[in-house]
Every structure is written in structure tokens, then in C-alpha cells.
Amino acid sequence: MSAALIIAVDGPAASGKGTIAARLAAEYGLPFLDTGLLYRAVGVGVLDAGGSLDDEAAAEAVARALDASHLSDTERLTSREAGEAASRVAGYTGVRAALLQFQKAFALQPGGAVLDGRDIGTVIAPEAQAKLFVTATPEVRATRRWRQLTGRGEVIAYEDMLADIVRRDERDAGRGAAPMIQAEDAVLLDTTDMDIEAAFDAARRIVEAARVRHGL
Ligand code: C5P
């Protein structure tokens, strides 16, 4: 690849954006950062220290001290509890500020990168050449996440999963500092009626079109 290609993949919880982003990274041989893991690690860090998720200063301190060793327990970080904690601490301006530079530096590394999250195309890497906003109906997203979590032994009712997703959407969308909105130059990819193969195929076509547009 001649010049750096930055791919920003945003969207709500369980839209398929994580899987799509990871596969795009493999396809183009680019480093990949799941930025949700950073917020999840902060939430889990606060809980593990016996702190409260209402304590903004505590969450900011955890965010400032975050390093790679906090990101290794993916089973714990991808739990329902961690997702809930993440969306609480992600509302704190200090937490977002503490995580900003690391994410920006990751996006701007030589050769390019793929990042997935909520604010990649708008805040972290507005210069990204390829921007996708991946979505699906709340019901389909709840079903996917329910299958994923129950498949590995978490006990949760589908109705509770759907309530989680709807609450998380409201929290993420209403965020003053970094609302989850589609960047103006992002392409919307609705995966409601797609399996992962079809979704990845559509995502790849979007990236290919962006590469042609930018001469990459
Ligand atoms: O994507 P994931 O479900 O792992 O994200 C967990 C939570 O972290 C989200 O609900 C959101 O509140 C927060 N988040 C964020 N900005 C990002 C990534 C995640 O606010 N770039």
C-alpha cells in the first residue's frame, strides 16, 4: 500500500461493526483497535478497585493509568457487566480526554489503521479516508448479542438484552461531548438483513470505493 489508509468504523452496540472492522484490518493488513475495549477496561478498572461508576474523578484516574495490561482479559471485558460499565464512564469528559491521544496516535501511525467505536469518524480520525457507520435494528442487535453471551454461558433473558441495547443507544446518542452520530462523509451500512459474510462484502466495497476516490 502506497499511502496510509485509515478506516473508521462506527455504530451502535452489536451492530456487527467489531467483526467487520477486524476483518477489514485482516484484509488490508492494517493494525486494528477496538476502542470500546478502552472504555470497557476503564469501567472494569473502577469496579475492581471497589469504586463507584458515579465517581467521575475515579474513572478519569483509571483512564489516565490505562495500559496494555488492562486490555488482555477479553472474556471479562466483553461481558455484559463491562459493556454497561463502559457506557457509564464513557459519558465523562475527563475519561474521553484521557483516552483521546492514544486513539489519535493509533489512527495516525504510518501505513494506516482500522479503528472501531462511536466517534472515530467524527472525533478520533476525522481525516479517515474510509468511514462506515454500521447499524441494525435494536431487535436484531439484541438477538446477536444474546446469542454471543448465552453461547459462552452468561445467563440473560432476551428482553433484558433488548432493554440493555436500547438504554445504551440512548446514553451513547445523548452524549454531550461525543454523541454517537454518523459523520457527514460516512457511508451507512444497515446489516439488519445481512449475515456476516454479506455485511463484510458490503463493507469491503465501501472501502474499495474510498480507495479509488483517494487514489490509494
Ligand atoms: O463498542 P462497545 O460495545 O465495546 O463499547 C462499549 C461502550 O463504550 C459503548 O456503549 C460506549 O458508551 C463507549 N464507547 C464510546 N466511544 C467509543 C467506543 C465505545 O463512548 N469510541
Image (cartoon, grey):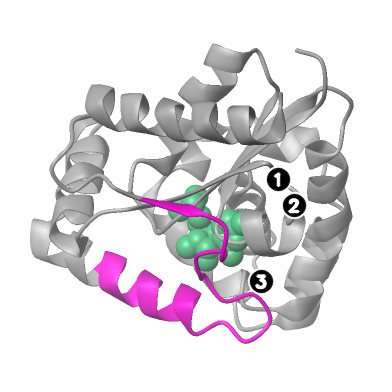
Q: Give the image quarter of residue 161.
A: bottom left
Count neighbours of disc 3 (C-alpha within 10 A) and say few if under 14, some if 14 to 19, many if 20 or more: some
Tag 2 or tag 3, which sits nearer the N-term? 3
Indicate which label's residue lies in the foreground, 3 or 2: 2
Q: Is residue 141 magenta?
A: no
* Local secondary structure at mark 1: loop
- Image: magenta residue range: 164-188
Q: Which residue is mark 2?
A: 125
Count neighbours of disc 1 (C-alpha within 10 A) and say few if under 14, some if 14 to 19, many if 20 or more: many
Comparing 47 with 28, the one in front is 28
Q: Residue 40, position in %: x, y?
A: 58, 53
Amino acid type at circle 1 is Ala
Q: Which residue is mark 3?
A: 51
In this view, 201 is above or below 155? above
Establish whether ligand 1 lies closer than 8 Å to the Cβ of label 1: no
The dot on residue 74 is: none
The dot on residue 128 is: 1
Comparing 80 with 188, the one in front is 188
Q: Residue 153, position in %: x, y?
A: 23, 35
Q: CA distance from mark 3 to mark 2?
A: 32 Å
Image quarter (top left, top right, bottom left or bottom right) of the N terminus: top right
